[in-house]
Each structure stands twice: as C-alpha cells, then as structure tokens.
Image (tube, helix red, strand yellow):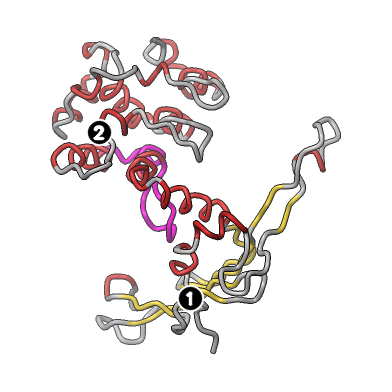
Amino acid sequence: MFKCKVCEQPLVIELDAESFDEATSSSVGQASSAPDDLLLMCGCHFHWQCLLDESPQIALDLACPSCQRSIVTTAPGPSATNSHLPPASPQPLILTRYHNEGGVQENLDILPLITEEAYLDANPAARPARAFMIGITVNLRIPAMCGEGDVARVIELLTALQQDPEEGDMSPSELLRFQDPLDGMKTGLHVAIERSQQEAVWMLLWLASGLPSHVFPSEVVQAAESMEASRGTAEGGVDIRRLSDGEGRTGEDVAKGMGAEWAGLLGAGVLRV
C-alpha cells in the first residue's frame, strides 16, 4: 500500500460522523475513513493537504517535493486551434489523479491551487480577502462569498475583522476594495457581477460606494439593517465603482458586456460614478 511521501502515513483521511452518511459508511455514527490519495505524474503519492503545504517550493521549481522530478506539462494555447489568433505560449499544467471520498478525478490540474497557496503563504493577510472574493478553494469545500452571493458571510467576516482584528489583518474598508492579483485584479464587485449575484452587488454598493442611501431598494436597506451592516465602510475609501481590473474595466464595464442581464441597474445608473 502506498504512503504519503511527506508524512509517510497511509493515504486515507479520518471522517467524523457528520462527514458521511449511511450510504458511505458501514458503521453509522462512528468515525470512518476515506481515501485521500493525490498521485503526481512522477508516480509519487501524497495526501491532498500534505502536498498543498509544499506549495511555496513547488511554485518555484514545478517539481515533485519528494523525487524532484518535473511535474509540469503543457497544453496548447488558444492559437493552436484558431489561425486568426497570434501564436500563444503553451499553458502550464500540473495534472494529477485524485482519489477521495467522492471517487477518482483524472487529469485534475492543481497548478492554480498551488499558485494560490504559495501566494497566500507569502501574503497571509490576503487569505480572508480571497475568501471574501470567491472562496478559498483548498479541499474544494469552503463556500464562496461574493462569487456565490453569500452576503451573510460577507457581513460576518467584516464584523469579525472589526471586532477582533489581528496584527497584519486588512481593515473592513480595505477588504471590501481588495483587488485580487490571482484573478486579474478584480474587485468583489467585478466577481459578483460576472457571477450574476445581484444581492451581493447591492450589498457591496451599500458598503463601499457613495451611492445615496435613498437610491437603494427598500428590501436591500431592510436586509442591511437586519444584518447590522452600516455604511461606515463606504466612507474614507475609494468608491468601489471606480476601481478597474487588470484590463481596465470597471464593474459597470463588465455589466455592459453581459447583455440584458444587468440592464436594470445599468439603466438606473447605479453602477456609474
């Protein structure tokens, strides 16, 4: 039986009673285990988290942390199948096979996760900001916030930062205006618009824009008041509607490119400064 090349333990993970149901356990109510086997192209096996813990070094050399062999492969760029596009560099990939409680995933590219974990290791203060933007994807289990329209969790995170800040943490105002270097310098407003999360868009405008309060729909105001989301974070910082992503697009520009979906807000001018 293969063992993890980092910790030398069997390639399983212990699950508590809440993590599985009668269909996946022969002894309901007691601890059970599930596979946790990440296989690299070099042939080395790892626990999922054990490999992610090695992300800073892997991001530098794109090599297996155990055998040091290259684990990167490439995929053709867009121009390989479209003669109208200029030549593009091949896209690097780290293809793996991952076996967990959900089954086997073949050709799973973990390079985006490795890149993200390496960035967060070097910039720990950005971890809550990444969760705020799209949800940290470690283990693919933590829900998104702006990208999934989870307004309640956004407010919880902002409240926690305000009431119990730790050294090096972003302030709530900074978090709301965070521009993600791993996602084209987009703000939460860009992400919420792209993912059609209207409730999140309204809440971000409430918390981080100079849009007058009387412009907001009554249900948005009531929801904000019920969650004790004050407009204090809208003051003293740049209006989130002014912030452009790496392509120079504001949230309004993104909405304009999505057809009729955002016609109501565009027509009302609420995304325009």
In the rendered picture of this protein, how many numbered marks are placed on residues?
Answer: 2
Mark 1 surroundings: few (<14), some (14-19) or many (≥20) residues within 10 A: some
Start-end of magenta stretch: 134-151
Q: Amino acid at mark 1?
A: Val
Q: Residue at x 23, y 37 (%)?
A: 158
Q: Residue at x 23, y 43 (%)?
A: 167
Q: Residue at x 54, y 85 (%)?
A: 2
Task: Kindly state the secondary structure of the residue where label 2 is placed.
Answer: loop
- The N terminus sits in image quarter: bottom right
Looking at the image, residue 128 lies above or below residue 174: below
- The C terminus sits in image quarter: top left
Task: Kindly state the secondary structure of the residue where label 1 is placed.
Answer: loop
Q: Amino acid at mark 2?
A: Ser
Q: Which mark is residue 165?
A: none
Pick the front one: 218 or 165: 165
Looking at the image, residue 41 lies above or below residue 204: below
Q: Which residue is mark 1?
A: 6
Q: Is residue 215 magenta?
A: no
Q: Quadrant of residue 264?
A: top left
Mark 2 surroundings: few (<14), some (14-19) or many (≥20) residues within 10 A: some
Q: Residue at x 44, y 63 (%)?
A: 53
Pick the front one: 50 or 34: 50
Q: Quadrant of residue 162?
A: top left
Q: Which residue is mark 2?
A: 171
